[in-house]
Image: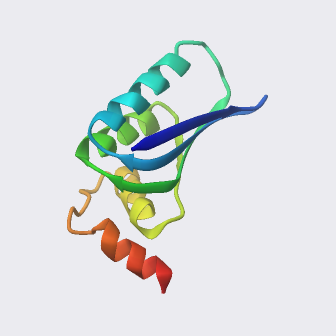
Amino acid sequence: MLKITIMETATDRRWIVQGRLVGPWVNELRTTWKRAHRSQDKRACIIDLNDVTSIDKSGERLLRAMSKKGAQLMARGLYVKHVVEQLKTGGVNSTSFSADRTARAEEQ
């Protein structure tokens, strides 16, 4: 499941994404992104991924495309932060870097 909350201020539009960015939920975020970007809005676009628990390859592709269009990707958890850094550097995401191991690492 995925929850998307959009918060708008005078200076930015922030998408708070929570849950799993996988399968059909990727299309939900893509649709929300496209609908919001139809306007010629010059505000900063921030994608808050702090509460995302997993991302599949289609989610990675969408985040990469959003980043290339100017979105700022924010993440603090080890797993999602790793994925975001790989997207920014153009590296290949390690699929063996599982959310289960990440959750255990963050608990320590």
Q: Nearer the viewer, residue 61 or 77?
A: 77
| Above or below 52: residue 97 | below
**Left or right of 42, for residue 21:** left
Numbered label tally: 0
Going by the picture, which residue comes out furthest to the bottom? 108
**Left or right of 67, for residue 16:** right
| Above or below 1: residue 79 | below
Q: Position of residue 105 (x, y in %)?
A: 41, 81
Q: Position of residue 90 (x, y in %)?
A: 31, 51
Q: Nearer the viewer, residue 22 or 62?
A: 22
Q: Position of residue 5 (x, y in %)?
A: 59, 37
Going by the picture, which residue comes out furthest to the front? 1
Is residue 24 visible in the rendered image? The answer is yes
Q: Position of residue 85 (x, y in %)?
A: 41, 58
- Quadrant, the N terminus: top left
Which residue is at 35% across, 56% downward? Answer: 54
Which residue is at 64% across, 18% downward? Answer: 41
Quadrant in the picture for residue 8: top right
| Above or below 85: residue 40 | above
Which residue is at 40% across, 51% downward? Answer: 88
Q: Nearer the viewer, residue 84 or 55?
A: 55
Is residue 37 visible in the rendered image? The answer is no
| Above or below 79: residue 1 | above
Going by the picture, which residue comes out furthest to the top? 39
Which residue is at 59% across, 12% downward? Answer: 39
Q: Nearer the viewer, residue 72 or 32?
A: 32
**Left or right of 68, for residue 51:** right
Going by the picture, which residue comes out furthest to the right? 10
